[in-house]
Amino acid sequence: MDAGYKIENLLLLECNFSRVPNVSFKNNEVQNLVDIELNCTYQDNKVFVKETLFFESKVNDIVEVSAKITMLGVFEKVGEAKPSLEEFGNVNGAAILFPYLREQLSNVALKAGLGHIILPPTNFVKMNNGNQENIKN
């Protein structure tokens, strides 16, 4: 590789999950909330991307399912790569980590007897351009 970014490591830092015994599977009142928190730090030619996924499934303001999953991606800049460290971390690095967070949530939900939880697509370019509002569906 002449120039670019390479993945050094992807680490699961935290995974908290809870559900109530009687989840409302077919209730039209179910509201799923998704929030993503992103923190990037830089050291020399490395980018450390810490991404946290918050998920809640509510019925009538009662949380029936909740999860908090945090992963860390360590990326190394090789050569005169573009984009900048900051843009790579906030856009590319975040987008690389997101499928791993989604997969972790899906797996733990399956083991909890909930079936698949499908998260909406996330636009990290938009989030990076100052539109870092919470993502809620």
Image: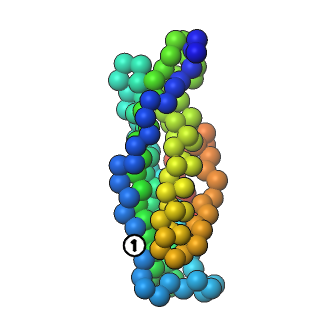
Q: 103 or 65, which lies in front?
A: 103
Which residue is drawn at the image coordinates 57% and 42% (left, top)?
Answer: 95
User: Where does the N terminus fall, quadrant-wise?
Assistant: top right
Q: Amino acid at mark 1?
A: Ser
Q: How is the image coloured?
A: rainbow
Q: Is residue 7 visible?
A: yes
Residue 88 is situated, as x and y percent measured from the top left of the image, at: 53, 30
Residue for badge 1: 18
**Residue 128 appears in the figure:** no
Percent across and percent down for residue 112 are 47, 74
**Residue for point 42% across, 56% down:** 69
User: Element at badge 1?
Assistant: strand
Question: On the picture, is 14 further left or further right than 130?
Answer: left
Residue 41 appears left or right of 34: left
The C terminus, quarter of image: bottom right
The residue closer to the viewer here, 128 or 69, is 69
So how many labels did they put on this image? 1
Q: Residue furthest front?
A: 111
**In the displayed structure, would residue 47 be above or below residue 133?**
above
Q: Quadrant of residue 20?
A: bottom left
At x 48% / y 20%, what residue is drawn? 77
Q: In the picture shown, does residue 122 fall above or below 83?
A: below
Vertical position of residue 106 compared to residue 77: above or below:
below
Image side of residue 61 versus residue 15, left or right: right
Rendered residue at 35%/54% (across/down): 14
Q: Quadrant of residue 82?
A: top right
Q: Residues within 10 Å of mark 1 (few under 14, many from 20)?
A: some
Residue 32: percent from left, percent from top:
55, 71
